[in-house]
Image (tube, rainbow, N blue to C red):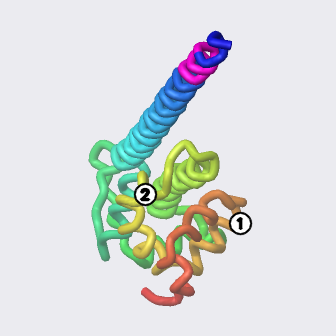
Amino acid sequence: MSDHPAQVAAWLAATATFLVTALKVLAELRQSREQRQAELRWKQAEAGKALNDEMQTDERAWPAMQMLDSDQRTFNVGEDVRLTVTQADIRAALDPGTESTAVVEFIRDCFDTWFYFLAMLDHYIDTGLIRPEDVAYPTEYYVPLLARHRLQVDKYLAHYGLSKVQGYLRRHPEWGQTDGAAA
């Protein structure tokens, strides 16, 4: 009978050791999960920054954004070739029914490239590769400027089936607050 208290003590010691070990393992698992989440978040932010950097250095996407930011701007489009673009030119170019001219083609090429980036942003947000806050700048500035041309943009995007661009624009409250009739 004297073995019974020793056996109980051994069982209690083993149970205590098991509980301490289990708690330690759970804490390490939690810490590991938190570390993986932090690494994922960092990778998401890096991917968003890389996309933004690429968009802002693209020879066509960046001019589209510059056009929106100016009432009139002149662009060098080739050796000794300069085109001046106005807000009226943008509205005309984004109307699918407008006939092609050098200015219209340049504007459409620029906006098609920028729209490609916006579609990529929407896709990557949908798939979780990036978060909206990772790419908020500079689009949070340019989407309201684009919204001045909402009527033409909506027609253009619908005409060319650019639903991912429409999806990205709808993420911005400013896009829904205008009908595009202004400017």
Number of numbered discs: 2
> Are there few (<14), some (14-19), or many (20+) residues within 10 Å of tag 2?
few
Q: Considering only order in the chain, which callout, 1 or 2, is on the residue closer to the N terminus? A: 2
Answer whether residue 4 is magenta in the image: no
Label 2 sits on a secondary structure element that is helix
**The quarter of the displayed image where residue 97 is located:** bottom right
Among all residues in the image, which is located at the extreme bottom? 182
Frontmost residue, 59 versus 83: 59
Frontmost residue, 64 versus 172: 172
Predominant secondary structure in magenta?
Answer: helix
- Say if 158 sits above or below 46 in the image: below
Among all residues in the image, which is located at the extreme top? 3
Q: Which residues are magenta?
A: 6-13
Q: Position of residue 18 (x, y in %)?
A: 57, 22
Q: Quickly name the residue at label 2.
A: 133
- Cα distance, mark 2 to mark 1? 29 Å
Q: Is residue 112 left or right of residue 77?
A: right
Residue lying at 31% horizontally and 57% vertically, measured from the top left: 75
Q: Quickly name the residue at label 1.
A: 159
- Say if 2 sits above or below 62 in the image: above
Q: Position of residue 46 (x, y in %)?
A: 39, 39
Q: Is residue 11 left or right of residue 57?
A: right
Frontmost residue, 115 versus 91: 115
Which mark's residue is nearer the viewer, 2 or 1?
2
Quadrant in the picture for the C terminus = bottom left
Is residue 59 something one can see in this rendering? no
Label 1 sits on a secondary structure element that is helix
Among all residues in the image, which is located at the extreme front? 1
Residue lying at 37% horizontally and 53% vertically, measured from the top left: 62
Q: Position of residue 22 (x, y in %)?
A: 56, 27
The amino acid beneath tag 1 is His
